[in-house]
Amino acid sequence: MIKLFKVKEKQRELAENSNGRPPVKKQSAGELRLHKDISELNLPKTCSISFPNGKDDLMNFEVTIRPDEGYYLGGTFVFSFQISPIYPHEAPKVKCKTMVYHPNIDLEGNVCLNILREEWKPVLSINTIVYGLCHLFTEPNHEDPLNSDAAAVLRDNPKTFESNVRRAMSGGYVGQNYFPRCI
């Protein structure tokens, strides 16, 4: 019985594709939702989106943030987004590709943003994440750090923290770590 259904399904596919064109790949629910999210993006003027693998690969893209205020003013920070096929039921995987001295971003690019972890809900969107990332640059949070050294300096001596951020963004060492220029 199962074989009969498979044969009928194959015949239907062949009939649908008899026009000589290759079969059209069906989009997953995650791809459909992501397409909706991207079409409704309302990015702040300090952000842009790009698709390094082309517009056919919506599930992998980059967001560039150029803060216009705060400690990170003038810097350029690139984040990669990897979207799961079960999006929005699973949060996107977001990594910072720019090495940055930041209490909420570690030296490997992992990002500490609550909506990417325990507070993710399917009603949230890519737009929400981008605004959350922008907020990390205007209001770094020393209370929930991934880079505990940067968090301690921010908490205990904001002037030194600002100096360290400037040195790192200009291309220099902070402690034992070298940061490539991102201004």
Image: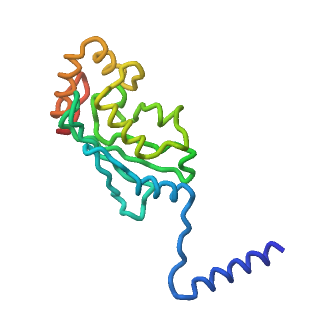
Q: Nearer the viewer, residue 157 or 43?
A: 43
Q: Give the answer, above or below, for where 46 lies relative to 166.
A: below
As drawn, the residue found furthest toward the top would be 156
| In-image side of 174 versus 110 (left or right) | left
| In-image side of 17 versus 60 (left or right) | right
| In-image side of 44 versus 60 (left or right) | left
Colour option used:
rainbow
**Residue at (28, 16) in percent of width and height:** 153
**Residue at (30, 21) in percent of width and height:** 150
| Residue 111: image location, x then y, percent | 40, 34
| Residue 10: image location, x then y, percent | 68, 79
What count of labels does the image hold? Answer: 0
Q: Quadrant of residue 167?
A: top left
**Residue at (15, 33) in percent of width and height:** 170
Q: Quadrant of residue 163?
A: top left
Tell me the quarter of the image containing the N terminus: bottom right
Q: Give the answer, above or below, for where 45 lies relative to 73.
A: below
| Residue 80: image location, x then y, percent | 37, 46
